[in-house]
Image: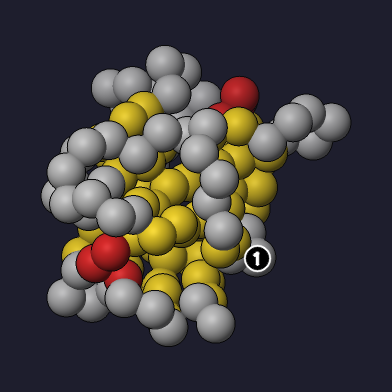
Amino acid sequence: QVQLVESGGGSVQAGGSLRLSCASSGGIYSRFCMGWFRQAPGKEREGVATISRDGSTVYADSVKGRFTISRDNARNTLTLQMDNLKPEDTGMYYCAARVSLWTSGRCAMSDEYNYWGQGTQVTVSS
């Protein structure tokens, strides 16, 4: 019954910035681990960043220092701020969620995320 809807994708030039948003409905958002994943054409889906119930974050090495994940539990929203974008960041970006029993501790990208959005396309040109 949980629904996730991404927005904010688009086309930008290398070095530019973009901010993705994910709106959640259903469930108790404050009890979710949340994450952003992406899939480039012809490649497997990979984790980008996750954020726990208490705000602890995990980032893929490829985006550390450039991307920032955050959440607003009052508005049931998830955000991915992407700066200094590179062509290799191109892909379909998905918002995902899973129920977490714990208020603290990082959310692993390898965990099973049960709920997924439809995705939003990000294209970075050189």
Residue 16 seen in render: yes
Q: Is residue 28 above or below residue 80?
A: below
Q: The disc labelled 1 sits on which kind of residue?
A: Gln
Which quadrant, please, contains the N terminus? bottom right
Q: Quadrant of residue 104?
A: top left
Label 1: how many Cα within 10 Å (few below 14, some 14–19, many 20+) = some
Image x and y of residue 84, in percent:
38, 28
Image side of residue 7 versus residue 57, left or right: right
Secondary structure under tag 1 reads: loop
- Is residue 94 found left or right of 67 in the rendered image? right
Vertical order, 49 against 80 (above or below) = above
Q: Position of residue 33 (x, y in %)?
A: 35, 52
Q: Is residue 14 visible?
A: no
Q: Which residue is mark 1?
A: 118
**Residue at the spot 28% in from the left edge and 64% down from the top edge:** 31
In the displayed structure image, the side of residue 109 where residue 43 appears, left or right: right
